[in-house]
Amino acid sequence: MSRSTQEVRVRVPAKINLLLAVGDLRPDGYHDLVTVFHAVDLFDELVVRLADRHSVRTVSPGSKAVAGVPAGARNLAGMAARRLAKEYRATGPVAIEITKQIPVAGGMAGGSADAAGALVACDRLWGTDVPRDRLAAIAAELGSDVPFALRGGTAVGTGRGNLLSPVLTRMQLHWVLGLGHEGLLTPAVFGELDRLRAAGDPPRVPGVEDMLSALASHDVHRVAAALGNDLQAAAISLQPGLRRTLQAGLQAGALGGIVSGSGPTTAFLCESAQAAADVATELAGTGTCRSVRVASGPVPGARVIG
């Protein structure tokens, strides 16, 4: 086997939920979702190599270990590799190294992105040539956001978020991302939403029609006005400081701001790349978030880059 087939490198993006409408708690413990996913150019990179045993190592861009990421059999990327290996009788175990830029427990589907990246990398490494629809079905078994991390772009998600319909738009959106000081666990945020609703049912975001119409119009001001997230109130309830971050981003000149997914990352939509750079500088000086990133989208999903 040549060196090029012993190692595969994949890049996979973070996501922002432009709109996230959460239904009531179902008897099976899940919530029906209607969301508009949007992939942005904040990437994790995975290098997957043939090895004597399955393993997963997660590091920062400076090669330091990353806290808060499950290891071994509990890591979603490792689960993805073993799931694909079992179904397609792969030729051997793999070592997965993840260089992580997507925030951990940040509401941007970093774990799901890594699982999607592992599926694409292992499929190429093992030469299994799994049909894309089958790869998407395996992705859905691993987690609700994993199919979108495979696809990327902009898409409407229904069911648990795993049933996708592409949104055909050429509109580029420019973002400033405020990374939280501490992570938020998705089950805890959903649980807090259920508690808040039982106590008085906070206002719900509207359907996706306004957002889809705004994207079709190519009017960034309309997109900003249509941003919405039913989980935002729950995330703020658990981390009240997020309210100050949202206010700071808007005061810095963003057109709109939202908690991304289950949080605590905040996403601010800006009029242009230059406006995003200006807002990022202003937001970083407020001290309301751990760090600030500038991003844009949409971008493709998990892709082999080497």
Image (tube, rainbow, N blue to C red):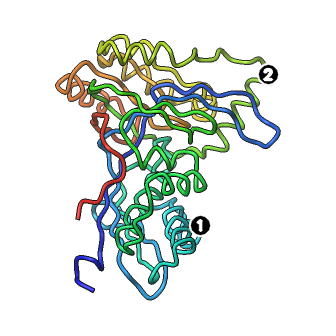
Quarter-of-image position of residue 274: top left
Residue 34 vs 122, above or below: the answer is above
Q: Position of residue 156 (x, y in %)?
A: 49, 30
Q: Position of residue 5 (x, y in %)?
A: 28, 77
- Please tell me which residue is depicted at 40% across the width and 28% down the height of the picture: 167
Spatial CA distance of label 2 from label 1 is 35 Å
- Please tell me which residue is depicted at 74% across the width and 28% down the height of the picture: 24
Q: Counting other residues with Cα less than 10 Å from the Cα at mark 2, is it few (<14), some (14-19), or many (20 or more)? A: few
Q: Residue furthest bottom?
A: 52
Quarter-of-image position of residue 142: bottom right
Q: Which residue is mark 1?
A: 74
Residue 239 vs 225, above or below: the answer is below
The tally of labels here is 2
Secondary element type, mark 2: helix
Residue 265 versus residue 31: which sits nearer the camera? 31
Q: Position of residue 70 (x, y in %)?
A: 54, 64
Report the disc number at residue 240: none
Mark positioned earlier in the residue sequence (2 or 1) = 1
Secondary element type, mark 1: helix
Query: Three-letter amino acid code at disc 2?
Result: Ala
- Please tell me which residue is depicted at 27% across the width and 63% down the height of the picture: 62
Report the disc number at residue 199: 2
Q: Quadrant of the N terminus?
A: bottom left
Q: Residue furthest right?
A: 27
Query: Three-letter amino acid code at disc 1?
Result: Arg
Q: Quadrant of the C terminus?
A: bottom left
